[in-house]
Image (cartoon, rainbow, N blue to C red):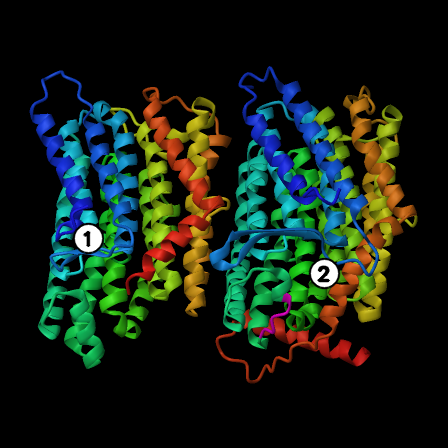
Amino acid sequence: MISSQFDAIIPILCVTLAGLVVLLAEAFRGRDEKMPIGGLAIIGLVGAGAASILLWNRNATSFGVVTADNFSLFVNLILVAVGILTVIFSSQTLERDNIPAGDYYAIMLFAIVGMMLMGQATDLLVIFLALETMSIAVYVLTGIRREQQQSTEAAFKYFLLGAFASAFFLYGVAFLFGVTGSTNLDRIGSVIAAQSMSGNPMILLGVGLLIVGFAFKVAAVPFHMWSPDAYEGAPAVVTGFMSTGVKAAAVAAFVRVFLSSLEPMIADWAPVLWAIAAATMILGTVVGVAQTSLKRMLAYSSIAHGGYILAGLVAGNDVGKAAILFYLAAYALTNLGAFGVIALLGTRERANDDLRDYAGLFHSHPALAVLMTFFLLSLGGFPPTAGFIAKWYVFSAAIGSGYYGLAIIGVLSSVVSVFFYLRIVVMMFMTERDARPVPAPITGVAMAGLVLSLIGVLYLGVLPSAVIDFAQASISTIF
Amino acid sequence: MNGLPLLSIAILLPIIGSALLLFVSNRDGSKNALVRNLTLAISLVTFGVTLLLWAGFDPSAGAPAFQFVERHAWIPAFGIDYYVGIDGLSLMLLVLTGFLTPLALLTSWDSIKKHVKEFSIFMLLLEASMLGVFSALDIFLFYIFWDFVLIPMYFLIGIWGYDQRIYAAVKFILYTMAGSVLMLVAIIGLSWMHQSATGEYSFDLLKLYELSIPAGTQYWFFLAFTIAFIIKVPLFPFHTWLPDAHVQAPTPGSVILAGVMLKMGGYGLIRLAFPLFPEAALYFAPLLATLAVIAIVYGALVAMVQPDMKKLVAYSSVSHMGFVVLGIAAMNVQGVQGASYQMLAHGVTTGGLFCIVGMLSDRRHTRQIGEFGGLKTVMPRLTAVMLILTLSSIGLPGMNGFIGEFLIMLGAFKWDPRFAVVAALGVILSAVYMLWMFQRVFYGKITNSHNAGLRDLSFREWAIVGPLAAVSIGMGVAPNVFLKPMEPAIQRIVDRVQAHQPLVVDLASRKPQASSLAAVAGEVSSSFAKASEDKR
């Protein structure tokens, strides 16, 4: 590989290039010509994944604002997996939902570009840039079914609130710049450490505003309001993509900013994040119980999972950092699988995401019901699935830092969450079937995607050691 | 024989078996017979393996504490191992699991008609996870098996149960899970304590035994573990899930639930809660014993007024498992031996009672005592077997129930006679409710014409209840066969716990964050502790 300024952004370039090629391919496509556009996207993503693996342990940096340390490469690999699974599930639903493949895949790839940049950026302004790249693409994806009122409404809500959050974030950056004279994370960190300015009101205000911005993106209480509407309105595949990819990217930047440059101030922000994490876990699970739409239910579940991840951030120790990475990987595979099932069961007219729509699924689609059960058990944190190891890992981090209270809130809220995951299982296995529109037969490719997610979920649950070691190695190079 | 990893084979066989079943295509039910025979064969081989374990087990006092030990690194970064091994106590519970599973499967041949393949898979997974619980020596592994047990049982109740099955299944899983997640927090806390004491994480039970844990931590961790276990037992006032689960569960589910799963709670108390936190355990023992005698009497009284046979047997379980907790709380050799023996005896006897209730319910599609009467004239053989099981449940001398209850009473009396006195009421009451039920169902004239044509035990039903009745008598006649292997293990645990002094909790200076409930509990138990202190 040519050692140059460009090394660190190779993964990002791969995905960008794939996005451009997809756009061109769509432009040159004949009216009824079939083109494997999804395949192009996958090639780009695999390239990015390969580049990330090759960059492992090299600590490449580009232009002083983008780094390719192991932490961001781990996140990149999660994002690649998210992208590939999303493309696989989309391959069956795009045509059904009348979504133009070229536009869709290109926007999705550009969103991944933003996500990857968010994990890799070491400058607050670049993080903002990445945040916007990602967000704007995701707003569009949310409203991509233009003929659907609900979809458009969701996109608009998401856009308005998201714009506010971005403004908050930028405002916070401005304050930090005003105090420290830099937007570079390392520089900010050393200035804060050197001048011990943890009590400085300007910097506290800046940190507070950053928390608002990040909390919005990870859908943490009380900045979660957008997510149930956005998740419900977006096509199911996009919801899966948003709930995993956006969350992974935002958490990655959150962790990098707070546990590297703002580490010296941990005593100031940890109590705030403690409260946010606790409220997120409780509200996500308790409100989730009242939902009857599966997408909404999983939206609240996604909020709750954000809370568990924040528990790892509050812990602030090495176990917590590695736990967050592991959690993101486990959650990405599990949630994408669950939304994959939801997406495959939809029809053009109806999303079929009401709880009643799952009655007797085991009798009509046994394979889908079994797969969904595994994903739900993993979300609920049952062994031997990825979700259990992930939860154990973050709670272990919290307890290691002495946050017993947070861990107890976490485990008890996960019991509450089990209640609503099991409602779906009850519907699928223990309830008689209603008359309902029959979804199109599941293609082999989509099924393979689900099985792939399941293998990942079980691998992380039964033999987590390799990935745990990998996650630990990822955090050892930075911070 | 010692070259073979017999313990892992026992745990893995049912898992491999259930994986094999996945490949049998049985959507229309045409291969039900094949599935049933295959499952039965797997469970019988597993039973054979547990018997081999028994044959190879060295029960002498000088033998290593844990035998058939296997250890493989699993998550080395956190010192988590696949670490299994058994002492006499685990061994007996493994054999019990191996023994009851094939019988429970046989009871399903009549009662389970739909989704036989899925049913068989869940039964085998259940067996594997229960075997895992009883043999894990790494508490992380223990927790994994402990938690996993819930999933197959949830499906067994929820899919194949009776009318209110969904309610019962959800209540069962949420109730038991709420208890066990707090145990997870304590388990993680223990591993961190080990890390700060020695510099490395460990979930190795034997290493954690050696940890010296500060008093305040013992207090909370003991509560976290114990609540998980007494919900499973279930001890009054945490028993409310049990009648629902039992009444709604299909017969094989009830057999396993009463026969083996409740024992996981007692086993956890003996293996984990008491020896890990001996000081807190001794401090809380009087409180546990109080709840236990309440459970004994309350369970018996409620059982007496049940019109439904299955519910009656379920409440009798609450009463009998109260004895188990009483024996454990006494924490002397007699008490714990009695508790262990009672667990085995209750598994066999109550398993048998649920089988018989299931057979009656399969024939008549009702379990109301009032619907029956005079069955002795039409089904003398079933009546005879039922009589044996009833008598052993009552604890007639010469039957298995007697040995356990007697030893428990002995242990309790040595510790604090007042508990033994109240518990004795339970023995009397058990005779009342069991014999009264027996009389109303089997004696007298046939008053309901539906009962006139009932057939007696079939060959297969003989194969189910015959061994249970035989073992009930056998355990009563030759208790030493079962007690001897358990003795060194129990002696070690009792010695370990009794080497400590109970915690001293100064109520006046207790920190305000202690919840009021805990404060009350402390008050009640410390008054008991004082009383028992005086006795000594």
Q: Chain of mark 2?
A: B
> Looking at this view, is A72 or B14 the one in front?
A72
Q: Position of residue A142 (x, y in %)?
A: 19, 39
Q: Residue furthest front?
A: A2
* Left or right position of A442 against B11: left
* Amino acid of disc 1: Met
Q: Quadrant of the N terminus of chain B?
A: top right
Q: Chain of mark 1?
A: A
Mark 1 vs mark 2: in front: 1
> Looking at this view, is B317 or A304 the one in front?
A304
Task: Name the residue carrying label 1.
Answer: A118
Q: Residue at x 51, y 80 (%)?
A: B511
> Looking at this view, is A307 or B497 the one in front?
B497
* Amino acid of disc 2: Ala
Tell me whether circle 1 and circle 2 mark residues in contact (CB < 8 Å): no
Q: Position of residue B489 (x, y in %)?
A: 77, 59
Q: Residues within 10 Å of mark 1 (few under 14, many from 20)?
A: many
Q: Residues within 10 Å of mark 2 (few under 14, many from 20)?
A: many
**Which segment is the magenta one?**
B209-213
Relative to B438, does residue B484 appear above or below in the rendering? below
How many marks the image carries: the answer is 2
Task: Name the residue carrying label 2.
Answer: B292
Q: Residue at x 69, y 71 (%)?
A: B282
In this rendering, does residue B516 appear at all?
yes
Dominant secondary structure (helix, strand or loop) of the stretch shown in magenta: loop
* Left or right position of B250 against A47: right
Relative to A135, does residue B453 appear above or below in the rendering? above
Q: Quick one: SS at disc 2?
A: helix
Rendering quarter of residue B153: top right
